[in-house]
Image (cartoon, rainbow, N blue to C red):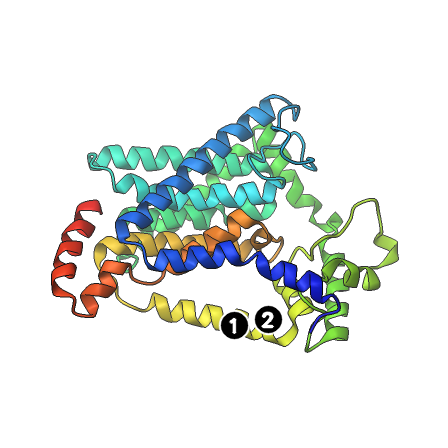
Amino acid sequence: MSLDPEQTRLRSKTLTVPAATFLATLQLTAASRDIFMRAVVAFALISALLGMLQVASGGSFNLGIYDQIHEGFPIGFFANRNHEADLLLIAIPLSARVLLLQRWPRQVQTIGILGLSSLFAVSVVATQSRTGIALAPIALIGALVIWRGNIRDRVSWLSAAIVATMSVAAFAVLNLTPIGRQAFHRFSSVGDDLRPHIWDATWAAIKNFWPAGSGVGTFPPVYNMFEDLDWVGSSWVNHAHNDYLELALVAGLPAVLLIIAYFVIAAVALTRRLSFPLRGQRYAATAGIVILAGHSITDYPLRTFALLTLFAFFSALLYPSREARARRSGSRGYGRASRSSEFRND
């Protein structure tokens, strides 16, 4: 049911790559999943370095990929600094997982994790994404849990509290720098943000189209019907800047039920026991899901193909790898061979 069936059909095709990624990840071995993580960290590092070049050039260098609305900010390979911040945040726990796989002394691994985490965290502040900055402690705590190796360890909880405290202190120090002052000044201008007005208009539209919804892909024209004319400007509102509200508008009650079902299924998956080598993957995936789901409250990261595909990858990581399932199903020969391979790679 849609006001624009053709647009809805086109939007449904955008799920092809994420769905394929989810299904493929379920069939991957633990070692192959780690290779994917390495690729993501490498891509995030290149994007962060590109962002530094974009800032240094004053916005004159952006590779000409997109028409920029955030010129002068580090946006990497994205068109939106908020989405660049999401990638950098995701890379923090993933980099901890990747570095722990290296056959290096523990001290060298720790220094590497601290170095990469600091680089990505500072790059997030440079994007001046408010929600990205607010989510940074979650990414850092995720990296800490992966480094510790067990979330049930009391030391992990104590360390997490220390990391949260140090994050606040680090942000206070960053506030002394020009980039930090500019970033944190944006928090004082929240009252001037258009998002609350967009949410009000979206909520009014939801009430008019509930419970069936207006149809996936119909947000812009439907929003225009309920937009407050006092806030109409030169910018075009393409999304609700809250994916939960937008889904409730375009897909109605079915979308709300599916969102609830997703989090219930994910919670049940997290309660399943995994072998120690696979816990790091699950911790990294959980941190990534929390970051993307959290940022979806104030933006639309899952409307970006790269981040949506990562979300599908993380969702699949909540489930055992191929060799782990084979061992559970009683494939003895395959299980023994895979087990040695899994521990060798972890």
Residue in the image at 33% along x and 43% along y: 96
Question: Closest to the observer: 332 or 192?
Answer: 332
Residue at the right extreme of this rendering: 229
Say the numbered circle drawn on residue 260. Answer: 1
Residue in the image at 83% along x and 63% along y: 225
Q: Is residue 317 visible?
A: no
Q: Position of residue 147 (x, y in %)?
A: 29, 46
Residue 284 placement, left or right of 204: left
Residue in the image at 14% along x and 55% along y: 337
Q: Position of residue 185 (x, y in %)?
A: 65, 39
Q: CA distance from mark 2 to mark 1?
A: 9 Å
Q: Position of residue 210 (x, y in %)?
A: 71, 76
Say the numbered circle drawn on residue 255. Answer: 2
Residue 12 placement, left or right of 266: right
133 shown above or below 27: above
Crowding at label 2, few (<14), some or many (≥20) Cα neighbours within 10 Å? some
Q: Secondary structure at mark 1?
A: helix
Residue at the bottom extreme of this rendering: 211
Q: Is residue 209 visible?
A: yes
Three-letter amino acid code of the residue under disc 1: Ile
Question: Closest to the observer: 132 or 218?
Answer: 218
Residue 109 placement, left or right of 201: left
Q: Are circles 2 and 1 on residues that touch, CB within 8 Å?
A: no
Q: Quadrant of residue 252?
A: bottom right
Three-letter amino acid code of the residue under disc 2: Ala
Q: Quadrant of residue 198?
A: bottom right
Work out which quarter of the rendered image holds the N terminus and state it: bottom right
Question: Closest to the observer: 204 or 66?
Answer: 66
Q: Earlier in the sequence, mark 2 or mark 1?
A: 2
Q: Position of residue 182 (x, y in %)?
A: 64, 34
